[in-house]
Image (cartoon, coloured by chain):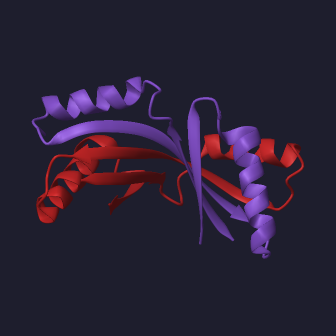
Chain colours: A red, B purple
Amino acid sequence: MKISITITLKDDVLDPQGKVVNQTLKNMGYRSIENVRQGKYFEINLNEKDEKKAKKISEEICEKLLTNTVIENYSISYK
Amino acid sequence: MKISITITLKDDVLDPQGKVVNQTLKNMGYRSIENVRQGKYFEINLNEKDEKKAKKISEEICEKLLTNTVIENYSISYK
C-alpha cells in the first residue's frame, strides 16, 4: 500500500522559507503570487493490506516521528 | 486560486533523507515499512481566476525555480 503524507506548518506559524520563495518569485516578475507556504512530503510503501492497520500505522508514525505537532499539521492519503 | 505543488526525487535518484527515515522507523519497530521517499511541498495562493493562466504560471515557476528537473519530478494540483 502506498501512502502519501503531506506536512505543513500551522497557519499562525511563520514560514521564512516560504517567504523567500515568495519574494524570489515576485522579483522574477510573477505579480499574481500572493502567498507561498513550504511543507514536507513523504511517500511510504507499506507492506500491509489491511486498510485499518495501515491507517493506524501511518497516523502513529506521523505523530511520533515525522510531524512536530506543536507547529505542524499532517494529512495522509492512501492509494 | 490555491495551488499545491509536490516535488519528488526521480525514482533512480538516491534519497538519503528518505533512507534515514526508513531506518529510524524500522528501529522503532515498524516492520511493515518497505520504502520511504522524501519530497518537498508548496502551497501557493495565486491571484488569478483564469485557470489556463494559473496553470501556465505554476508550470513556469516549477520549471524555473522550484524543481531541479534533472533529478526531480513535480506534480501540480489546483483547488
Q: Position of residue B53 (x, y in %)?
A: 81, 66
Q: Position of residue B63 (x, y in %)?
A: 72, 42
Left or right of residue B28: residue B3: right
| Image quarter (top left, top right, bottom left or bottom right) of the C terminus of chain A | bottom left
Left or right of residue B16: residue A51: left
For residue A64, which quarter of the picture? top left
For the point 38% across and 37% down, which residue is it?
A: B37
Left or right of residue B74: residue B21: left
Residue projecting furthest to the right: A29
Q: Position of residue B69 (x, y in %)?
A: 65, 35
Left or right of residue A52: residue B11: right
For residue A32, which quarter of the picture? bottom right
Q: Position of residue A51 (x, y in %)?
A: 16, 63
For the point 27% across and 40% down, which residue is it?
A: A65
For the point 11% across and 38% down, which residue is it?
A: B31
Q: How many labels, in total?
A: 0
Residue toward you, B37 or B46: B37
